[in-house]
């Protein structure tokens, strides 16, 4: 089936007639394509998993009778940036009040829920949450440079293969002394395959990159809004009234 496709479309013929330099560039582009597709699929799965876990966490937080319930029970929502922000805010709250990394160490649940902190401590909690947002975004944006490089660089690499191949084709033409279409066509055909390959690498990478960037941008706004909600809940529940 694949051989028939290549033969009928002319790709097999073009590759067969390509120069060694063009073939090396084609193989390089094939490697770039493999890397970009791997990164693209991993990032799509990472974002899908993050959204799925965040939905589960937010549903649980909404129906929980105690706002600190998820934190105190140490429930895990792997990959959820919303859960990470919530946990960071709660941990910072307990660290400011108790100076402990483990809120359950030596304290009953009843005493933990009676925490009161001065209003100025909210700035410290806000700083910790903002740092966590940055860490979560760095994880989501990790390796995106590979997609951007494939999208912007692959067409130029393909063009390099085409120019190189055409240059070799004209060199062979000069040596043969026969300026006929039959003499030039095979070399030019092989050279143009390099440009086609470059575009085949770049187009999916470009579309995937733009989709992921747009998704991360929307998620960033959502995380910032959620961080504001977390700070509001902490202020409402745990800031001492005489410090407001």
Image (cartoon, grey):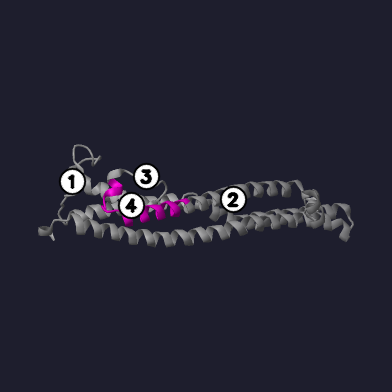
Q: Which residues are magenta?
A: 49-71
Residue at the farthest left position: 242
Question: Are the two marked residues, 3 and 2, in contact with CB atoms closer than 8 angstroms?
Answer: no
Residue found at x 18% / y 46%: 110
Alpha-carbon distance for marks 1 and 2? 51 Å
Disc number lying in front (4 or 3): 3
* Pick the front one: 90 or 186: 90
**Measured from the top left, where is residue 225 in percent x and y?**
33, 62
Distance CA(mark 3)–CA(mark 2): 30 Å
- Disc 3 and disc 1 in contact, CB within 8 angstroms: no
Instruction: Please indicate, yes or no, whether residue 179 appears anywhere in the rendered image.
Output: no
Mark 4 or mark 3: name the one nearer the start of the chain: 3
Q: Which mark is residue 110?
A: 1
Residue under label 4: 85
Residue 183 in which image quadrant: bottom right
Across and down, in percent, residue 170 comes to 80, 56
Between disc 1 and disc 2, the foreground one is 1
> How many angstroms separate mark 4 from mark 2 (CA)?
30 Å
Q: Earlier in the sequence, mark 3 or mark 2?
A: 2
The residue at which mark 3 appears reads as 76
Residue where numbered disc 2 is placed: 37
Q: CA distance from mark 1 to mark 4?
A: 24 Å
């Amino acid at each position: 089936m694949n051989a028939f496709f290549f033969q009928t479309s002319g790709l097999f013929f073009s590759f067969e007639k390509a120069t060694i330099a063009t073939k090396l560039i084609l193989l390089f582009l094939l490697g770039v394509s493999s890397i970009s597709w791997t990164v693209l699929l991993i990032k799509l799965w990472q974002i899908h998993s993050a959204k799925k876990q965040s939905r589960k966490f937010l549903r649980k937080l909404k129906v929980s009778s105690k706002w600190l319930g998820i934190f105190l029970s140490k429930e895990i929502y792997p990959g959820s940036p919303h859960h990470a922000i919530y946990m960071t805010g709660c941990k910072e709250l307990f660290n400011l009040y108790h100076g402990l990394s483990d809120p359950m160490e030596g304290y009953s649940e009843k005493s933990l829920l009676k925490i009161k902190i001065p209003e100025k401590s909210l700035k410290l909690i806000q700083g910790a949450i903002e740092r966590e947002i940055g860490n979560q975004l760095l994880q989501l944006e990790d390796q995106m440079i590979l997609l951007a490089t494939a999208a912007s660089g692959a067409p130029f690499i393909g063009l390099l293969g085409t120019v190189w191949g055409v240059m070799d084709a004209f060199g062979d033409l000069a040596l043969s002394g026969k300026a006929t279409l039959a003499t030039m066509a095979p070399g030019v055909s092989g050279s143009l395959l390099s440009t086609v390959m470059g575009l085949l690498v770049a187009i999916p990478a470009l579309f995937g990159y733009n989709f992921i960037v747009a998704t991360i941008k929307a998620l960033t706004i959502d995380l910032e809004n959620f961080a504001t909600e977390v700070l509001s809940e902490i202020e409402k529940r745990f800031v001492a009234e005489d410090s407001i």
